Image (tube, helix red, strand yellow):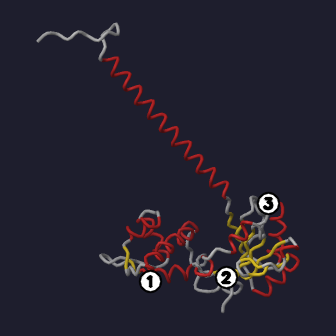
Amino acid sequence: MATGRTHRPATRSRGIPEATVARLPLYLRALTALSERSVPTVSSEELAAAAGVNSAKLRKDFSYLGSYGTRGVGYDVEYLVYQISRELGLTQDWPVVIVGIGNLGAALANYGGFASRGFRVAALIDADPAMAGKPVAGIPVQHTDDLERIIRDNGVSIGVIATPAGAAQQVCDRLVGAGVTSILNFAPTVLNVPDGVDVRKVDLSIELQILAFHEQRKAGEEAAADAGVAAAAARKESAEQGPDGDVPAVMPA
């Protein structure tokens, strides 16, 4: 079976923009759900809504893949699943190592979505000697002393860092030195890597802070709306009163 070390996705060489690449997994997730329901075709509007983008952007993204829907019919779901999977490099086996088997690392190891999406957890690695040999998700944890050998023996090019922040850069340096060229970083720190190494950072605290910003903005908008309603009510009440604030007498018919 092919490994990630010898086969790289063709997206960059084909000139597909990074923004489009970032949306391809969204389309694939929506298409996979349609495929599981045996839906044969889908319109750009329906697929865009399922993926959370607008249909014009979707059609533009698919044009980079050389995929154009049939007017009045839409896109062939199974073909698009294959086409996007191929562009993302998911039609081959990608061995992955996870370094740092604490609560987060163990949760990642137990995640069932890796295998169905073209990724195989080749090894779990931790610096705690007490963890060595213990099975997590059916895989025995190995010590960091063997990190370079593990990467070499399994042909690993993708590493996941789930260590505390203080250990992340050292782990990153060792991964890169051993030949890893793509890193998914869950540690709450910025990693410095050489050219040619791709890093994707997942920071849950940042995502929560962004949500807090939106909640604060919504609360401010609601408060402003309430104030506007109160002001309008006050103006209406003032207009219905006389010049001295008294309700004007009703003139006889």
Residue 165 has which mark?
3
> Residue lying farthest top?
244
Q: Quadrant of residue 115?
A: bottom right
For the residues carrying marks 1 and 2, which lies nearer the camera in this image? 2
Q: CA distance from mark 1 to mark 2?
A: 23 Å
- Whole-number angstrom distance, CA of label 2 to CA of label 3: 25 Å
Residue where numbered disc 2 is placed: 120
Q: Tell which circle, 1 or 2, labels the residue nearer the N-terminal end.
A: 1
Q: Give the percent coordinates (x, y) of residue 193.
A: 77, 67
Q: Are marks 2 and 3 in contact (CB under 8 Å)?
A: no
Which quadrant would the C terminus be assigned to in this image?
Answer: top left
For badge 3, the amino acid type reads Ala
- Cβ–Cβ under 8 Å for marks 1 and 2: no
Residue 27 or 135: which is nearer the viewer? 135
Amino acid type indicated by mark 2: Arg
Residue 101: % across, % down: 77, 70
Residue pictured at 34% horizontal, 7% vertical: 244
Residue 143 in sight in this render: yes
Provide residue 63's location: percent of width, then percent of height.
Answer: 45, 74
Q: CA distance from mark 1 to mark 3?
A: 42 Å
For residue 168, side relative to residue 82 (left or right): right
Q: Residue furthest bottom?
A: 1
Q: Residues within 10 Å of mark 3 (few under 14, many from 20)?
A: some
Q: Nearer the viewer, residue 187 or 190?
A: 187
Residue shown at 37% from the left, 25% from the top = 233
Report the number of numbered marks: 3
Q: Position of residue 36 (x, y in %)?
A: 45, 80
- Kindly identify which numbered label has been placed on residue 78: 1
Could you tell me which residue is drawn at 87 percent across and 73 percent down?
A: 130
